Image (cartoon, rainbow, N blue to C red):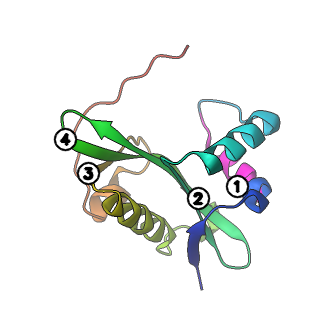
Amino acid sequence: MMHIRMATQEDVTPVYRLAKDFATSFTVYERAFAYAFRTLLAEPNAYLAVAADEDIVGYLLGFDHYTFFANGRVAWVEEITVRQDCRRQGIGWQLMQAFESWAHARQAKLVALATRRAAPFYQAIGYEESATYFRKLL
């Protein structure tokens, strides 16, 4: 049975493997990843959870912060991935449900994310298209 839990330092290697497969615009370097992983585990506004049975098969990294437009906190899903051979089994939905519960407990007004590969998934779990995503590499 799949279990969603907060990540621990012991999860660094399996999450690194998943992150390497997830990344399309950047190369994930192990040393930078390990530093970011440790930092995120200690960050009070960060949420890093894993989907695990015997192995870790997915993770979700998100944040919450205050905004003016929403009159309070909003939560943002930065990364979510499920191992290719484990998709379409409800694991992504479980990760999102756990994040939504975390965000709700922190009194976030909404959960948002950017995607170019999984719009049908997010629409199926109740998300609606809201804006266009822009970025500038530095």
What is the three-letter code of the residue carrying label 3? Leu
Q: Circles 4 and 3: CB distance less than 8 Å?
A: yes
Which image quadrant: the C terminus? top right
Which is closer to the viewer, label 4 or label 3?
4
**How far from the left and from the top, in percent, is residue 101?**
37, 66
The residue that disc 2 covers is 59
**How far from the left and from the top, in percent, is residue 63?**
45, 46
Residue 15: within the magenta? Answer: yes
Question: What residue is rendered at 58% in x and 79% in y?
Answer: 2
Q: Which residues are magenta?
A: 14-24
- Distance from disc 4 to disc 1, alpha carbons, whole Å, reads 32 Å
Work out whether mark 4 precedes mark 3 in sequence or the reverse, and give the earlier one.
Answer: 4
What is the three-letter code of the residue carrying label 1? Val
Label 1 residue SS: helix
Say few, some or many: other residues with alpha carbon within 10 Å of mark 3 (under 14 / 14 to 19 / 20 or more): some
Say few, some or many: other residues with alpha carbon within 10 Å of mark 4 (under 14 / 14 to 19 / 20 or more): few
What is the three-letter code of the residue carrying label 2? Tyr
Work out whether mark 3 precedes mark 2 in sequence or the reverse, and give the earlier one.
Answer: 2
What is the three-letter code of the residue carrying label 4? Ala
The residue that disc 1 covers is 15
